[in-house]
Each structure stands twice: as structure tokens, then as C-alpha cells.
Image (cartoon, coloured by chain):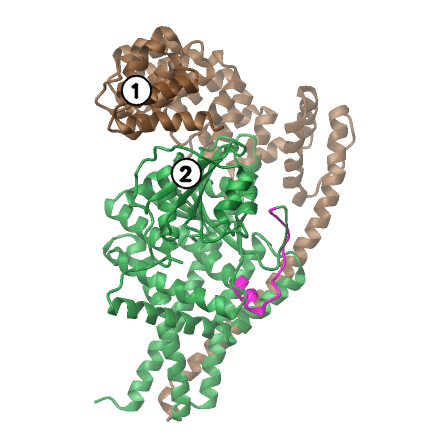
Amino acid sequence: MMSRGDVVFILSVVLLAYFIGLHLWYLLLNLFSLVTLYGVLEARVTQDLPHGWTGFEPPVTLLVPAYNEADNIVSCVRALEQLDYPEFEIIIIDDGSRDETLNLLRHELSLRPSFEASQERVASLPVIDVYASPTHPRVRVIEKENGGKPDAVNAGLNYARSPYILVTDADSLLEPHCLRSALRPFLQDPDTVESGGALRVLNGCRVAGGRIESVGLPDSVLATFQVLEYIRAYLFARMGLSSVNGVNVVSGAFYFVKRQALIDVGGTFLTFAEDTELTLHLHRHFGALGKRYRITYVPDPVCWTDVPATFRSFARQRIIWQRGLWESAARNIRLLFQPTFMGWIGFPALLVFECLGPVLEVGGYAFVVWAYLAGVLSVSSLQAFALLGIGLGGLISMTSILMEELSFRIYPRFRDLLVLSALAFLENLGFRQLNSVLRFLGTLQWLYRVAMRRPPDGRP
Amino acid sequence: MDSDLAPIVPFVVWSALVSLCASAGLILCVCVLRLRVAILKRRLAAFYAAWGARLRRVEEDVDVELPPVARWQTYFLLDLWVAECRGADAVARERLCVIARRMQLDAICLRWIGNLSRGGRRRMLSIIALGYLREPRAWDTLCRIAAEDDPLQSMTAAWALVRQDPQRSVRVLVALLQKRDDWSHVGMTGILREAGVDLFEGPLSEAMASGSPVEIPRLLRVLSALLPSRTPDVVRRLLASARDPEVIGRCLEALVSHEDAGYARAHLESGDYHLRVHAASALGRIGSEDDIPALCRLLGDDEWWVRHRAALAIGALVGFDARRLAELQQAQAAPRAAAALGQVAAEALPS
């Protein structure tokens, strides 16, 4: 029979091992990322060369699912039409909006019903009508019943004419060169099936005419914490994973996918994280076929998006993301049996650090509080553990900031750099815990739905 | 009770201290880097302004006195020199080359392309510079780079080879073009055009005669972009003997003469739907109104792409005449045949 002391010791070792493992994993990804970064920066110079790929790119279809986007939709279409790319079409999918989205498009683009014999490549809810614009020949609009973003993407896919599909959100702001940057991996390696670009935080930036005029940090502290999080987790961690073909999610706000690959996996699936689901599904599908394939992440800043600045919206987003992550991981659990980096290292790491991570972290916090209250843990030990949390968390974030400084230097003001450096440590004193608790709640919600045998529901 | 955790606590404290010290070091690095970048930016702006003006004077007069450049400035000077070359006319470019040799930029570039460890950026710049310099000593190295895996470096090396000696580059490039499927054919067409299209006719035709079904379509695309007038003969020869659908499809794509419509008609009922697609598209370009009934039959095909291309071909043959298209649409008994024509009519006549 184990004594209380033994239990406390074992729990402490397990939590400490998880904690150090998590940070070592991120440090390792940053290291991979650093190696890749050099090549990426070297490759960027070739964009200006006389015989680079410029001008030779294949046609692209932009799919823009829109649900109640009356505030953004017109400016979104105008901005998309200005993208610097030789040949592309834009398909807006109005996913049964209840606001003026479709009427605004009708008026702004002088839409007329256009007969389309679509190709039923993947299943989607019924399309009500298809419109073309005589004044904006690149744009078509699909009106369909509400079925959620994945269903809208599937509907758009049936009408897409190009071999490469870009899916983006109506409220995202794209860089003019984004299509060239994100398509580059497909041209350099024909086995690429999906690629994503780096998302940057729009809050705090000045925008004029659909373009970023100046970059700055947001006013909201919550949003500023997320800037750091985007740099650390969504930029350099994914870049590190990309170098070993282990990207586990390509953000739904901006991703390129080969049309045939998307058709092969049956389109996108209705979950709260259809982007994660799609990426994992592509890994599973092409891994099972035993064919060489690549899922790539382009670190160039291609897309700017607003992050939640209020606690309510932030909480909702994180809970939904976590639920979606669990749904996607559960649907693709067979990845564990594939003898690839993704199957044996990337996916298990996703399960341990991303899916189970919040459970372990919240459990760890509860344990520490209990141990302190029960007198098992002294104040000095508590301080030592807290210091380790701040130190390791700060170290990971600082390596990411260093890489940002070595590469893109998105935030030009010295003051912004100092603020980000300070937040690298401060985020471990509340933000990180808040995030873990919210993701823990997301995990509970997912478990509840599994227990109730309810199907995934990614509708807004 | 805390003694239960006693073995762990020193490890935790030391790990915390190490990570905090490392983080502090990184903050310092970040600040130094930012400062360094700011200083470098200022120095570079001054360097580019001064040397930009000097190189523009060189374009007028090759005897301009130039100061020596510091070692760290060499890369930026080469970058500026390449940019000037890109915009200069032939005479000015020749003067720029004279001055580059005088400053021994050619020797530096030769060193840089041979040295992989110095990074792709310098290597790429050197390849372009050696292309402008027409440096014969670089020939072998450029041939080697043109055969390397990196498509951008290899294509740039191919361009540099053409700049150096178009005649000599022909055999090298056609052999590579035959093997490489990662080169942008449009990019290569541009490079070969720079060499002079006539040089390539013989070697391309020979390569096609001995090429595999994978290689022939690639070579044919280049040939039809470079020498459209010579392509029909080659295509006819290939169509007479080819059995591979990929080759036949590419040949059908390259048909441009009404006289060759028979080749397309022969594949309208092929078992391979890709060939039916190509045949329909070809008839849209080179067929006549007599082909409309055959194309109408394709409107009922099981494959969407065949129906779509057949509808487009019909549209092209009737000049996208709204009335004719409407009549043909009404005459279709099968709903999907009418739908395919309806889409073409709607897209062609949005108003």
C-alpha cells in the first residue's frame, strides 16, 4: 500500500516530467524551426529574380465561406480582387446568412443568377442559387442552406475550376503577395497537398484600403498576450513541425489545398476545428496510401486576423478550439498506427501536449494548491515550482521572439519588442492558467457530447 | 511533509535558474540584434545611395574611378550590380561587366558558387552575376548546378548557361529538360527564347523521337511555345505512331490547323475520358459546324469534364451566339446535356 508521501512524490514527478517534456518539445520545434528559417530566408531572395516562378503560377480558386458577414463582405471582395496573382477566381459561399450579406453582394457586384452545371465532387447541403457578376468577372457567389463553414467549403469545392484551392475567412485581411507565397511549396514540391501561411494579429494595426499601413501591438492586454502566443505556437512551432512533415493543423483562416487531395478525403468535415480535422485527415489518408506527400507551413506573413479582445469571446473561442481538437484527434486516432513522423511522434505529441495538456495542467494546479493547503508543499517549494514555470515558459517565448527578430521583424518599434519580451514572462502569471482552464472546459464539453453520443456539430 | 519532495526541489530550483538566465541572455540578444539591424540599415542606405550613383556613372563612362569596397560590402555591391545590369541596355551592361571584372567580382562569384556552405543567397546572386558576366570559367560549375535538385537554382543556372554560350548550352539544356519535371516549362521557354529559338528545333525534335511517354509531352509543350510553326509536323508524326494517352492528349492540345481536325475526330469516342476531353477541346479550336452533332453526343457523356469541354467547343463553334446556343440547349433531351450548354451560355453571356 502506497503512503500519501509516495503518492505525492509520484504525482510530482509525473507533472514535472510532463512540464519539462512539454517545454523540451517546444524547444526542439524552435530548433527545427531555426534550421528551416535559414532556408526560408534564403529562398525569399529568389522571389525577385528574373527567372523565378513569378508569373508562371497555376490558376487558383479562392473559397470564402461567409455567414452573417455583412460588416466585412464588401471590403473583403474588394481586397481579394486586388491580390497580386496572375489568374484566380473568387467564390463567395453565403452559408444561409440571416443578415444582409447576400443582399449587399447582390447590390455591390450587380449579381445575376448564373446557371452552373456543378460537379458533385463532395457532399454538401443544397445550393439554392449561383450568381455571377458582369462587372466583377472573377467573382461568383453561391447561396446555400446553412450548414457551417466546412459544408460551405464543400459546396464551393463543387464549383471550383482550378487545381489549387485557397480557403480564407471573410474577416481576414490578406497580404497582396499571399497567393504567391503560399503556393510556392506546391511549385517546389509537387507532392505537397496542403500549405498554410503565418497568421498575424490584426488588432493594433492600422488598415487603409484593405492593406496594412502600420503594424503595432493591440491596446487590449488579452489581445497582446495572443500576439505572443501566435508568434510562439502558431508560427515557429508549426514551422518546426513543417520541417519534418509533422504539421498538425493549418489554420482555417488561410490554407491552400490541392483540389484533388480535398476531393480524395471527401472534403472538409463538420467539426469545431475543421482545419485540424482536414490536416490530420490528409496525413491519415496519404500516409495510409504509402505515397510521398507534404503538408507545409509557410512562415511569411500572409494573413492578418482579429483575435478576441474580450474575455467572453476569448473564452468561447478557446473552448470551441479544444472541443474541435478532441473531435479531430478522435476521428483520426488511426494515425497512431502509421509508421511516419506524424503517426509515431507528431500525433502522440498532439494528444499528450495539446489534447491532454490542459487536463494535466489544471490537475497540476489543483494538486499544487491542495499540496500547499495540506502542508505537503512548503512555501519555498511552491516558489521553486512557480519560478520553473516562469523560467521555462519565458525561455520558449524568448526563443520565438529571437527568431522573429532574426527573420521577419514584424513589429518595428523597439517598445513593442520590449513589451513582448516582458509578456514572455508575465503570461505565465495568469494568461497561461486561464487558457488551460478554458481548454479544460472544452475537453469536458467534448467528453459530455461523447458520453451523450451526440455527433460533432461545427455550425456557428 | 515537504521532505517528500526534497529530492526534486534542488533540481527544480536549478532548472528554473538556468532557464531564467538563458531567457535573460536571449533578451539581450534580441536588443543587440535590433540595434545592429538599425545601424546596418543606415549604413546600407548610405552605401546603396553612393554606389548606385557610381554604377550609373559607370554605365556612361567606364573609366570612372571607384573606391575599394570593404569585405562586408561585397555582397551588397554585387546585389546592386545585378539590379543595375537588369535594367541596363547592352552597351551599359558591357561597361558594368568591365568594371565588375576590374573589381574582381567575377573571381568572388566563382568562389561563392563553388562554396555551398556560404548559403543559397550568395550562390544564387553569383549564378546570376556570372550569367551577366558571361564568365567561361563558370561553365562546368553552372552545368553541375543546373543538374542539382533545387529547381530555382538549377533554372537560374540554365539561364546563366544560355547567357554564356547559347550554342553550347542547347544540348545540355535539352537533355536536362527531358529529365526534369520540376522546371516550370513557361520559365524554361522564356530562357530558351533568349538563346534563340532556331537553335533548339533540331535537338528538341531528336529528343522527342527518342523520348519516353513522360518526356514527350513536356518537350512538345516547349516546342509548341518556342516554334509554333514547326509543331504541326512533329505532332502529326507523333499522332501517327503514339499509343500513350498522355502523348496523344498533349498532341491533340497542340493541334492548330483545320486540316488536322480528323485527328481530333478520331478520338471523340476514345475509351479514355481524358482523350475525349482533349478531342472536344481541339474541335472547338480547329473543327467546323459539321462537328456540332458529334460534340452534342458528348454532352451526354458520363464525365463532367467531357460534357463541359464539349459544351465549350460547341459555344466556340457557334461564336457564342446566344440564339444558337439556346436552340441547341432546347434540342437536348438529356437534362445534363442541356445543363452543360446552359452553363457555357451563362458564363459567356453574363448580361
Chain letter belonging to callout 1: B
Q: What segment carries the magenta color?
A: A210-228
Q: Viewed as shown, does residue A54 lie left or right of A278? A: right
Count the numbered circles shown: 2
Q: Amino acid at mark 1?
A: Ala
Q: Position of residue B73 (x, y in %)?
A: 67, 43
Question: Is label 2 or label 1 in front?
Answer: 1
- Distance from the alpha carbon under mark 2 to that under mark 1: 24 Å
Residue B213 shows up from this direction: no
Identify the residue at image location x=69%, y=49%: B41
Q: Is residue A348 above or below residue B343?
A: below
Residue A46 covered by magenta stretch = no
In this figure, which residue is indicated by the disc labeled 1? B331
Residue A217 covered by magenta stretch = yes
Q: Is residue B33 above or below residue B171?
A: below
Quadrant for residue A457, please give it.
bottom left
Q: Amino acid at mark 2?
A: Val
Q: Position of residue A358 (x, y in %)?
A: 38, 71
Residue furthest top in the image: B259
Q: Is residue B255 above or below residue A68?
A: above
Q: Nearer the viewer, residue A224 or B267?
A: B267
Evaluate whether label 2 is on the same chain as label 1.
no
Q: Position of residue A405 (x, y in %)?
A: 58, 57
The dot on residue A130 is 2
Q: Colour of chain B?
A: brown
